[in-house]
Amino acid sequence: MSAINIGICGLGTVGYGSYCVLRSNSLELARRVGCEVRVSHVGSRRLRPGQDIGETRFSTDVFAVVDDPQVDILLELIGGTGIAKEVVLKAIANGKHVVTANKALIAEYGNEIFAAAAARNVMVAYEAAVAGGIPIIKAIREGLAGNSIQWLAGIINGTGNFILTEMREKSRPFADVLKEAQALGYAEADPTFDVEGIDAAHKLTILSSIAFGIPLQFSKTYTEGISGITQEDIRYADELGYRIKHLGISRRTKNGIELRVHPTLIDENSILANVNGVMNAVMVNGDAVGSTLYYGAGAGAAPTASAVVADIIDVARMISSPESSVPALAFQDDSLSDVPILAMGDVESAYYLRIAAQDKAGVLSDITEILGDCEINIEAIIQKEPRGHDASNQRVPVIILTHEIREAVMNEAISRMEKLEAVEGHITRIRVFRLDS
Amino acid sequence: MSAINIGICGLGTVGYGSYCVLRSNSLELARRVGCEVRVSHVGSRRLRPGQDIGETRFSTDVFAVVDDPQVDILLELIGGTGIAKEVVLKAIANGKHVVTANKALIAEYGNEIFAAAAARNVMVAYEAAVAGGIPIIKAIREGLAGNSIQWLAGIINGTGNFILTEMREKSRPFADVLKEAQALGYAEADPTFDVEGIDAAHKLTILSSIAFGIPLQFSKTYTEGISGITQEDIRYADELGYRIKHLGISRRTKNGIELRVHPTLIDENSILANVNGVMNAVMVNGDAVGSTLYYGAGAGAAPTASAVVADIIDVARMISSPESSVPALAFQDDSLSDVPILAMGDVESAYYLRIAAQDKAGVLSDITEILGDCEINIEAIIQKEPRGHDASNQRVPVIILTHEIREAVMNEAISRMEKLEAVEGHITRIRVFRLDS
């Protein structure tokens, strides 16, 4: 097979985001799949300002993409349960594989859609429908497949989590934060879907089905929103050692399965309680593995596109080489890269330094002069009065936090500082890693 | 295909754990794979006290399992790089698929093993080799496949994380906590592999390869342990807003790839900094998805077995129906379950109640009498003096945290309490979820 052709229906935020990721990571995609994966046809009412799809074929009628015989995999990124449903069912009828990010469509019509796909022997992949870029569908459906899942509990609506986080951290009322979320584009003009838990209920319905192997049952999901949460309740929860989070919970009990979305108090020390702002996280408890947690961005163009493209790769691998498994090291054996491993001296890092210095004039200026000489910038410094047994021998620890610098340079600076008469013994050096880098 | 036969080599903690999970979840496995998956042959020098493998064929020579023509998938759970390597290469030569939990073997000999497997067209799966039950191999290799991975940073040795957590939370010295970790069975008699970072380096080598598509290069991994970390450094890090964690870090830079294990300062507000005790977590940053995190138990019989069995299911699906993808709802279409969804009244939960009560004698006893009458147990109660505008109208909020009770009973109790003359307006009721349940 020389190339796999992708058709995109819907060129909104997620549609264009997926187009861009497919284009920018096309070489890595080919290394993973073993053949070229290209967008051959895009259907959308119009191109928005700033959207550039080069020479890619464009139709204003999405059904022109659905009926395009060249298209192998159709991306449904229209949203909603109207045209999107028609597009998906027609694509399946046309024998095309489908990738969708549409939680409402899967939660409400998934049983019908999967039956149609099974009858035509095509795949319908929907990783992007739940928790954006977090590969939670794959984790539960495959990664935890050895378990009998006991329960799952997730923060699966970023808008709601942003509101609750701001309410707690800044003591602001619900209505006030909601307005800000709308201004920031996190919440829709009509926030009902997010704030009243309908969006979360769509996602929970899907997670529950794959966790317990039950049909999709959106209509049976209990849903309660966060608009009634007050500062008073947040403060009392804090006092009791809890955080209030808007959770989707599904649990296996001897009498049946719980399926519920509502504000919930959880232990403030749990890792789930420390998921803040617009981030999503799902905790899944299996009988063998215990509790595992999956955390990341639950919305946004690029994170959602990440999940869409992962699904495309899964489907493309099945099309191009159904008898082969995923390559052992993720990329095709003949596509491994010979990028060198950096020697430690060439690694750039920020550093924490602890220097045992004698308490005399000029020590600090000697130290900072060496650092300045090596072009090492200081981010923070702590120097305290000597006390305890240090006081008797007049030693003061000097703590320095530096900006990023090549390790060889830092080693040279440390070696020079250790030669200073007023510096005693070895300097403690611990690297700092910026998780937001 | 009527059944897929598993051969197990090595019946230690993980080997017997995997045997037990395969046995206890055998019905769910068949629902997922579409045919029976059974252990047909176990090889181990001996059965330990308490191990029961029923009528399963047993050999004291592991190569009897390797050469058993009935075995489709061989589990190598011996460990180390001696006999384990021979077993794996011989099994591949015999045309068997292999599942292994052996990080040292994959990190040090993976290139040779995967080449042999590719030549024989068999699979070698190794999810259990990194971070125990967390499906991190699948997440990076498939779930994030749409991304160009930028970096990953992981707490991938539970012993080291336990030691650093105890040192910080209880102000204990390194040597003291190490002794406790040994007594608890977290650390080996010779703790070098864990505390000097060799175990973490094995795992990081594997993660780095699948993240960046490079050959396994264990010998080029920089490794620095935690035995030099002092209370002083932990306290100064705290003061600067950081935690010290033993991290494996691999990062793509323009000059090459960083591959390093060492103590590291990270922002105390990051979710990775809040991973404590023996738990593992890996943060992965992709160009599309941003940062995602995967958290869970990194060791232990059942968590590791969870990963082993997930690999078995992946391989078994490829054997039994290579043309079919993973079922849409995780289980085979004809195997969905009709377990009912519980009505909300039948859900059992703990509750947070906020009651606006008049500040007069007897109110609290009226409330607790109703709760007692409904057999609702109280876990905590907060009642404070009235203040501010509440003081003028003599209202006091009463906050009650209850134990688990059926929601219908709680609704009845709330309805009765709201009828009390001294209770004003509606009672606020928020559910509590125990994440350790």
Image (cartoon, coloured by chain):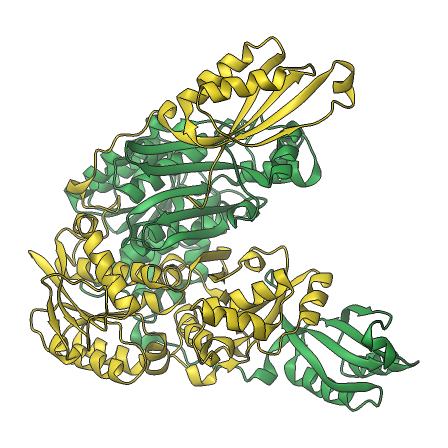
Chain colours: A green, B yellow
Q: Residue at x 36, y 60 (%)?
A: B133
Residue A69 visible, this orientation: yes
- Identify whether A358 is placed above or below B403: below
- Identify whether B420 is placed above or below B289: above
Quarter of the figure with the C terminus of chain B: top left
Q: Residue at x 54, y 15 (%)?
A: B417
Q: Image quarter for residue B84?
A: bottom left
Q: Image quarter for residue A375?
A: bottom right
Front position in the image: B424 or A193:
B424
In percent of width and height, residue B46 lies at 19, 75
Front position in the image: B246 or A114:
B246
- Identify whether A240 is placed above or below A39: above
- Identify whether A306 is placed above or below A89: below
Residue A61 visible, this orientation: no
Front position in the image: A197 or A272:
A272
In percent of width and height, residue B144 lies at 41, 59
Q: How many marks?
A: 0
Residue B384 located left or right of residue B350: right
In percent of width and height, residue A198 lies at 44, 30
Q: Residue at x 46, y 74 (%)?
A: B200
Quarter of the figure with the N terminus of chain B: bottom left
